[in-house]
């Protein structure tokens, strides 16, 4: 097959010509050309469907909503992390760490102190 010589522009570099001319063998020219040809009935996703500029925001929001994981009733939903921790570690977090007897109960929660008053 004969070679093809043509001019080309690289649009990623603002349309400046990289090389005034390029020569390719016929097989390579046809291979590169056919990369850009779609079979009949197919549409480029860039211009059609979920990612079309016209519908992109609405359709992506809808996809995210549909793909959001549902809350399952099958998974345990303990009221307290200590209830779930005990079967995993085989130790109770409620027991006293010193004597191992009894159950520790929160009586009072003290809020953290704020910044020290200015002494100037």
Image (tube, rainbow, N blue to C red):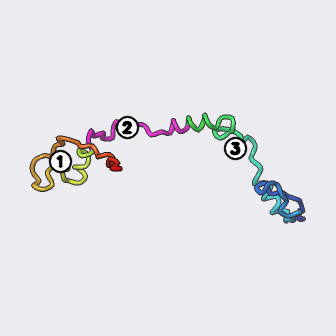
In the rendered view, would you say 10 is above or below 53? below
- The residue wearing badge 1 is 94
Looking at the image, residue 90 sits to the left or right of residue 116; the answer is left
Q: How many neighbours does mark 3 have within 10 angstroms: few (below 14), some (14-19), or many (20 or more)?
A: few
First along the sequence among labels 2 and 3? 3
Residue at x-position 9% and y-position 55%: 99
What is the span of residues highlighted in magenta in the rendered image?
63-80
Looking at the image, residue 68 sits to the left or right of residue 5; the answer is left
Q: How many neighbours does mark 2 have within 10 angstroms: few (below 14), some (14-19), or many (20 or more)?
A: few
User: Is the Cβ of the residue at disc 2 closer than 8 Å to that at disc 3?
Assistant: no
First along the sequence among labels 1 and 2? 2
Q: CA distance from mark 1 to mark 2?
A: 28 Å
First along the sequence among labels 3 and 1? 3
- The residue wearing badge 3 is 46
Q: Which mark is residue 53?
A: none
Q: How many neighbours does mark 1 have within 10 angstroms: few (below 14), some (14-19), or many (20 or more)?
A: some
Q: Quadrant of residue 17?
A: bottom right
């Amino acid at each position: 097959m004969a070679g093809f010589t043509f001019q080309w522009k690289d649009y990623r570099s603002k349309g400046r010509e990289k090389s005034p001319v390029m020569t390719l063998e016929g097989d390579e020219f046809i291979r590169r050309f056919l990369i850009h040809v779609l079979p009949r009935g197919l549409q480029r996703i860039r211009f059609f469907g979920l990612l079309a500029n016209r519908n992109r925001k609405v359709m992506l929001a809808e996809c995210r909503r549909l793909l959001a994981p549902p809350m399952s009733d099958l998974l345990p939903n303990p009221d307290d992390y200590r209830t779930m921790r005990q079967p995993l570690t085989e130790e109770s977090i409620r027991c006293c760490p010193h004597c191992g007897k009894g159950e520790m109960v929160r009586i009072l929660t003290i809020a953290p102190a704020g910044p020290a008053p200015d002494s100037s």
